[in-house]
Image (spheres, rainbow, N blue to C red):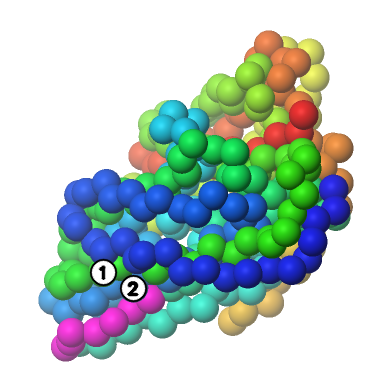
Amino acid sequence: MAVRKTKRLNKVQQIDRTINARITRDLPKTTFALLDMKLNINHTYVSTAATLLGLLNCISSLQLIVNGRDTKVNIPAWCLYWINLFDAAATPMQVINAGTAGPYDSYVYLRLPFACLNGVSPEDSVLDARKFDSIVLEVNWAGLLMATETINSGYLQIEPNFYAQVPADIKPASHEFAYINRNLDVAGEIRIDVPVKSLNQYSRIWVFTKNDSVVLADAQITNLRLETNTFVYMDTAAEFVHARNIKDYSLEVDAAPGTPYVGVYCLDMANFGYMNQRIDARVLNELTLILTSAVSNGFVYVVFEKMIYG
């Protein structure tokens, strides 16, 4: 699909933090490539310095809702951070003030992509909101998750990035995100049902594992398997997923070349960015993600990244 490459940036009124509140903001009805966002938290030291994860946990989830009922995006801010890092093969811009006084401002930039940034043709997917009755960004602010810091205030700044003068008859793919989480409460197989039928088409499945201290950790799982009742899409050791992610996304921890980011696994269905290799679950009766858990006291978060054509 070809669209005009003229991009425009418009600001949307920022969303101020309110503890344990769901705050919405109407977005313009246009053709979105992405949303650029800045999460800023003002905090004062109490007993332990601020961290990136603590900052990201101030937002429990970001949702994009169309026409009051169709949720195109539902994702925790900290999961979106890792997707941004993989897609850019670079650490998102950030300042985490770890001082022992305060107050301080810490911030991190996030990007909610509607274009297929990791695809051969990124413009295959554009969020065309011109015919929607409404399009709303919903921010679910968490409670006091930075327990060793006093949060004084915060906000999410938003700048939509969209295409101008796009023909009215385009039929782009839809780039969507959904997630689930559950306990790793038993050693052995953990079976997670992946939604099928409807419009479900998967380009990537992200698996994040945390230990019982709710910190990203690698020792939680040893194998990942994705299958139907008749076909195995993937059956791979967790360590091999790390190795492929480093090669495919040119990733590694800056301070330790060859070292993967712990607890983050990207199962990429669309090899080399070709979306015709995505899993089309519209025709499936079942699809199961099977994790081999090595622990009985951890957590797993699964983000389903969809590229919906047709």
| Residue 16 coordinates in the image, percent (x, y) | 26, 64
| Residue 285 coordinates in the image, percent (x, y) | 68, 11
Which three-letter amino acid code belongs to the residue tagged 1?
A: Gly
Which residue is rendered at x = 63% and y = 61% of the image?
A: 162
Residue nearest the observer in this picture, 60 or 215: 60
Image mark for residue 9: none
| Residue 150 coordinates in the image, percent (x, y) | 15, 71
Which of the two discs, 2 and 1, labels the residue nearer the N terminus? 2
Q: How far separated are the C-alphas under marks 2 and 1? A: 5 Å
Q: Quadrant of residue 6?
A: bottom right
Q: Quadrant of residue 168?
A: top right
Which three-letter amino acid code belongs to the residue tagged 2?
A: Asn
Q: Quadrant of the C terminus?
A: top right
Query: Total marks drawn?
Result: 2
| Residue labelled with disc 1 | 154
Image mark for residue 40: 2
Which residue is rendered at x = 65% and y = 58% of the image?
A: 33
Residue nearest the observer in this picture, 178 or 168: 168
Which residue is rendered at x = 36% and y = 39% of the image?
A: 297
| Residue 62 coordinates in the image, percent (x, y) | 42, 49
Q: Quadrant of residue 96?
A: bottom left
Dots 2 and 1: beta carbons under 8 Å? Answer: yes
Residue 219 in sight in this render: no
Residue 95 magenta-highlighted: no
Count residues near mark 2 (Cα–Cα under 10 Å), then give few for <14, some for 14-19, many for 20+. Answer: many
Q: Which residues are magenta?
A: 101-107
